[in-house]
Image (cartoon, rainbow, N blue to C red):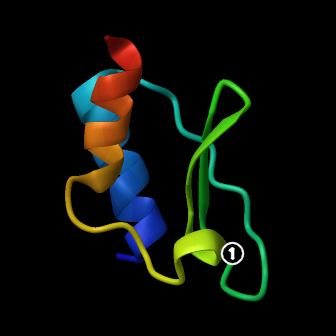
Amino acid sequence: MPKATSLAAEISEKFAIDCTLIEGDKGIFDVVVDGSMIFSKFDVDRFPDDGEIEQALSALAK
């Protein structure tokens, strides 16, 4: 299962958030919540580490 698909499934399950995957090109992998970028592969030149997106979402909920 591609990383984006499995990450979307994890977010949906853990946070009850509907995720929309938008196909891009050139290795784009951004995670945007309510219009705010919480992760950009372009900015950090890597995919998110395990748990990194979940941690960012938990911080937003506080």
Q: Quadrant of residue 29?
A: bottom right
Q: Quadrant of residue 3?
A: bottom left
Q: Quadrant of residue 47?
A: bottom left
Q: Residue at x 73, y 30 (%)?
A: 35
Residue 44 is situated, as x and y percent measured from the top left of the image, at 52, 74
56 w.r.t. 60: above or below: below
Q: Residue at x 37, y 32 (%)?
A: 57
Q: Is residue 35 left or right of residue 32?
A: right
Which quadrant does the N terminus fall into?
bottom left
Q: Residue at x 35, y 21 (%)?
A: 16
49 w.r.t. 45: above or below: above
Residue 37 is situated, as x and y percent measured from the top left of the image, at 64, 44
Q: Is residue 39 left or right of residue 51?
A: right
53 w.r.t. 27: above or below: above
Residue 14 is situated, as x and y percent measured from the top left of the image, at 23, 31
Which quadrant does the C terminus fall into?
top left
Q: Residue at x 26, y 40 (%)?
A: 55
Q: Residue furthest right?
A: 25
Give the residue number, with chain letter if any, for mark 1.
28
